[in-house]
Image (spheres, grey):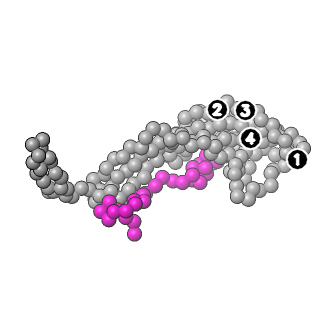
Amino acid sequence: MTNTSATGGYLAPVSSPSGFNALNDLVRAAIVGITGLDGRMVRPRWQPTPPPSPAQDANWCAVGITARQRLGEPAIVHDPSDDGADVVLTWHRLTYLASFYGPVADDLADRLEVGLGVEQNRADLRAGGLALSEVGDPVVAPELVNTTWVRRVDLELIFEREESRTYPVRNLAQAQAGIRADIGQTRTITIKED
C-alpha cells in the first residue's frame, strides 16, 4: 500500500508521465513516417544486444536520447478534489541524435529536417507530450566500419516536455498552531475544516 501524507513516510507518485521507451517509440515512428524508411531500419541507438549492422549500401537510421536537461524548478499545485493530492510539474529539454547511414543519408536527414516543419508531422509527437523546439544543422560524420567508410549524417532533434506526477498529499483537515506575542504570552488555536 502506498503511503499518504496522513500515514507519514516517503511518498511515491501515484501517477507518472509515460516512460522514455514510449517517447523513443514516438520519435522513431515520426522518423519512419517522414523519411519513408522501413520501420526495421530505424533502430534504437543503444540496445542491450545490438543486431548486426545493415549492409553498407543500405539506408538506415539509429536514434536515441543523448541529453536531458531540467528547465527551471518544479511547480507544485495542490488538487483539493477527493482526499487531495499534490501535482508536481517539471519541464525537460530532451536532445535526440538521429544518425542516418547509407548512400542517401544526406537526403534522409534533409527530409526529416524539413518534414518536421510541417505541423501534421508533429501532431503525434505533440499528442505524446513532445514539443519540437529545434532541429540542428546536419553534420556529415562518415564512420569507419570494418575498414570501409560508411556515409553518416547526424541530425540533432531537441524537444521540450512537461512531466506531471501526482503524490497523495491529503487535504488539511485540522491543524494546531501557537502564536507567541512579544510580551511572552502564548495562545494555541485550532483550525478545522467545515
Q: Position of residue 111 (x, y in %)?
A: 69, 35
Q: Mark 4 — residue?
A: 100
- Evaluate if marks 1 and 2 touch, with contact meaning CB atoms under 8 Å apart: no
For disc 3, the neighbor class at 10 Å (few under 14, some 14 to 19, many from 20) is some
Image quarter (top left, top right, bottom left or bottom right) of the C terminus:
bottom left
Query: Which residue is depicted at the point 78% across and 38% down?
Result: 152
Which disc, if any, is residue 146? 1
Specify the amino acid type for callout 1.
Asn
For disc 2, the neighbor class at 10 Å (few under 14, some 14 to 19, many from 20) is few
Q: Position of residue 167 (x, y in %)?
A: 38, 56
The answer to whether 112 is drawn above or below residue 9 in the figure is above
Question: Over which residues does the magenta segment extend?
Answer: 1-28
Instruction: Give the spatial CA distance, label 4 vs label 2.
Output: 14 Å
- Evaluate if marks 3 and 4 touch, with contact meaning CB atoms under 8 Å apart: no
Q: Mark 3 — residue?
A: 139
Magenta residue check for 14 = yes
Q: Mark 2 — residue?
A: 136
Q: Residue furthest top?
A: 137
Element type where label 1 sits in the image:
loop
Q: Position of residue 52 (x, y in %)?
A: 80, 55
Instruction: Give the spatial CA distance, label 4 vs label 1.
Output: 18 Å
Q: Nearer the viewer, residue 5 or 151?
A: 5
- Nearer the viewer's eye, disc 3 or disc 4? 3
